[in-house]
Amino acid sequence: MEWFASKGADHTVELNKGGSLIFEGIKVTMTHAVHSSSVEDEGQIQCVGEAAGYILELGNGLKLYHAGDTDVFGDMALIRDLFAPDIVLLPIGGGYTLGPQAAALATRFLGVTSVVPMH
């Protein structure tokens, strides 16, 4: 949080994996992700915490899972069991993100048919 504040972010909220908050009627829950988490700042690499994903539960009951930058991991099945997301946003593209086989496996673990590729 301190790094973001040092860059001018003045409206931050602390949250940790498994934690939830309500923001303007949307329940946000932080989940696990498997990826690096750093930024380049004035020529130096700064660690800015752990990679994470988010479940967004909208007022109408729709549940979105934004996986963040992540590789596929077996606990995506736990995300399915705990949250039953309707739509999943997965980082697909290879290199820094999921390749086709990993994305297909993540979709199977999550038990969804609606996937939005993103990065």
Image (cartoon, helix red, strand yellow):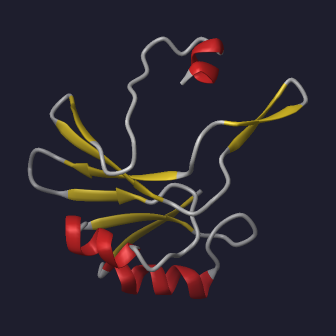
Q: Nearer the viewer, residue 114 or 54?
A: 54
Residue 113 appearing in the image: no
Q: Is residue 22 left or right of residue 8?
A: left
Give the quadrant of the N terminus: top right
Residue 23, percent from left and from top: 24, 30
User: In the rendered image of this protein, does residue 104 appear above or below residue 15?
Assistant: below
Residue 29, percent from left and from top: 29, 47
Residue 71, percent from left and from top: 58, 70
Q: Nearer the viewer, residue 16 or 90?
A: 16
Q: Residue at x 40, y 29 (%)?
A: 14
Based on the displayed image, in which of its 4 quarters is residue 100 positioned?
bottom right
Q: Nearer the viewer, residue 10 or 112?
A: 10
List the single residue furthest toward the left.
Answer: 60
Residue 111, percent from left and from top: 29, 82
User: In the rendered image of this protein, does residue 116 appear above or below residue 77?
Assistant: above
Q: Is residue 95 left or right of residue 89?
A: right
User: In the rendered image of this protein, does residue 4 appear above or below residue 87?
Assistant: above
Q: Residue at x 22, y 58 (%)?
A: 63
Give the quadrant of the C terminus: bottom right
Based on the displayed image, in which of its 4 quarters is residue 28 positioned?
top left
